[in-house]
Image (tube, rainbow, N blue to C red):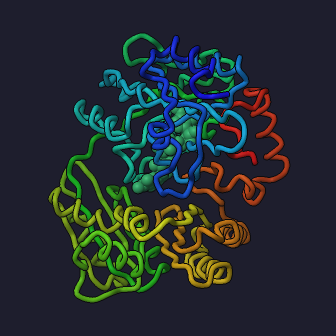
Amino acid sequence: LTIVDDPLAARLRSIVGETHVLTDPAVTSSYTVDWTGRWRGACRLVVRPGSVAEVASVVAECARFGAPLVPQGGNTGLVGGGVPAGGPGPGSVLLSLRRLDSIGPVDRDAGQVVAGAGATVAAVHQRAREAGWDFGLDFAARDSATVGGAVATNAGGERVLRHGPARAQVLAVQAVLADGRIISRISDRAAGGPVKDSAGYDLGALLVGSEGTLAVITAVRLRLVPLLPARVVAMLAVPTTDAAQRVVGLLRRRLDTLQSAELFHADGLALVCSELGLPLPFPEEHPTYLLVECAGRADPTDGLVEALAGATEVRDAAVAADAAGRAALWRYREGHAEAINAAGVPVKLDVAVPPAVLARAESDIRRAVRAAAPSARVVLFGHIAEANLHVNVLGATDVADAVTEAVLHTVAGLGGSISAEHGIGRAKAQWLHLSRSAEEIAAMRAIKTALDPAGLLNPGVIHS
Ligand SMILES: Cc1cc2nc3c(=O)[nH]c(=O)nc-3n(C[C@H](O)[C@H](O)[C@H](O)COP(=O)(O)OP(=O)(O)OC[C@H]3O[C@@H](n4cnc5c(N)ncnc54)[C@H](O)[C@@H]3O)c2cc1C
């Protein structure tokens, strides 16, 4: 089958128009490599529908052709789930949802908004803020990551401690099933729809974290949170991870304004400063750093400073309440992913452990990586309130499976989860059994088979 004669491409062109079916590998290649450069593949074609009706027709047509489909939003996912694997045969159709980027009017009194799956997280922030509300989900990839991708991966990020992960922001979902039928709990009328809904199974909730394996999400009705315009950020130097946890515990007990608590270490900070050309934040180096953010209607700075007065383990602190100063401090934390990428292609793992064993998990993970890849460089950082560690290993792509095996077994042995917020994707599919029992995996497979009997939606993702 050559690409020019592909009858599926011709059918899809008749649905979405000439310009929205891409077959030239020089053009499609940007869709088939992930943000880190570790996951690369190939696809049969890229199709970019512009409405839910077009998505439904595209999916139905692919089903008729028996063509596997890989949904993709902003392609910022970190587990290879939005990038087709490639390999023999005509390959998968890459279904880009980015054109579904409309955002409806904010329901100002109820605090909800309908966003197309392709709207970026940053665009939803903006729409919500213009209406005096805010969107509770936030992370560094906000300008590219889409609402559909965030919901499909149950993304977490920097405000989970206050607002919960993507799951907690979803009121209702519209989606296209594997055969092209549409399911929707989103009303066509204004921005509305019920805020409470217990009428049977919550199919939208089932799609949260389904990584494109059960249906294609086309729109989401999102819960908004109050806009808290007064913010303060503090970067704190502490001696250990245990100390960092104690400081966060104290702040959580004393402050109702705390919304972020991020952890990183001297090695990560040094990499960020050298790769991104930033000045060191403190005159002396410290083993561990915490970045905290508080937000309120009134300036939360005094409350934070007062609460920190009781935190004897804080060795140094930088505090910023103005926008430029806050952004400069956040750069030390949010710059981690970018600095690691600049230093090489990382093996990236995202895990959560019971908070009580976080420090032990860090040292066990470092030891496990050393055993699997003695010359590799490990950078750990993460969202400390959920004991969620991002494990980044540089110089180990040739032994990626051995490193993954070692880290995930270590985490499972500590009673943790092999994926805190990035999902399973392709990267961790063969290790799902470390976090899910045989009974759970059987139930998940039964759901997959019921909704996608031909196995066309994102094959190889979640289920190996
Ligand atoms: C710099 C950086 C920082 C990040 N920080 C965080 C963080 O703090 N917290 C966090 O949780 N994640 C983080 N991520 C990971 C990533 O941004 C999130 O997983 C994000 O939600 C993915 O959105 P996306 O639109 O890019 O999805 P994609 O990468 O396009 O897809 C991700 C998965 O969702 C599926 N999918 C996408 N759209 C749909 C749809 N409409 N319907 C069905 N399935 C779909 C894909 O098939 C794939 O399996 C970060 C990534 C980067 C690059």
Count of marks, rendered view: 0
Tell me where residue 289 appears, x and y as whole percent: 37, 76
**Residue at the far bottom in the pictured view:** 284
Quadrant that contains the N terminus: top right
Q: Is residue 283 above or below residue 157?
A: below
Of residues 127 and 226, the one nearer the viewer is 127
Tell me where residue 101 appears, x and y as whole percent: 38, 27
Tell me where residue 309 appears, x and y as whole percent: 27, 78
> Is residue 161 in sight in this rendering?
no
The structure residue drawn at horizontal position 76% and vertical position 40%, both measured from the top left corner, is 444
> Is residue 359 in sight in this rendering?
yes
The structure residue drawn at horizontal position 47% and vertical position 73%, both measured from the top left corner, is 245
Of residues 22 and 192, the one nearer the viewer is 22
Of residues 99 and 241, the one nearer the viewer is 99
The structure residue drawn at horizontal position 39% and vertical position 50%, both measured from the top left corner, is 141
Q: Quadrant of residue 71?
A: top right
Q: Quadrant of residue 283?
A: bottom left
- Compared across the picture, whether 151 is left or right of 277 comes to right
Q: Is residue 409 above or below residue 119?
A: below
Tell me where residue 313 appears, x and y as whole percent: 37, 84
The structure residue drawn at horizontal position 30% and vertical position 25%, both measured from the top left corner, is 108
Q: Is residue 154 above or below residue 255?
A: above
Of residues 40 and 308, the one nearer the viewer is 40
- Compared across the picture, whether 373 is left or right of 53 comes to right
- Compared across the picture, whether 70 is left or right of 334 comes to right
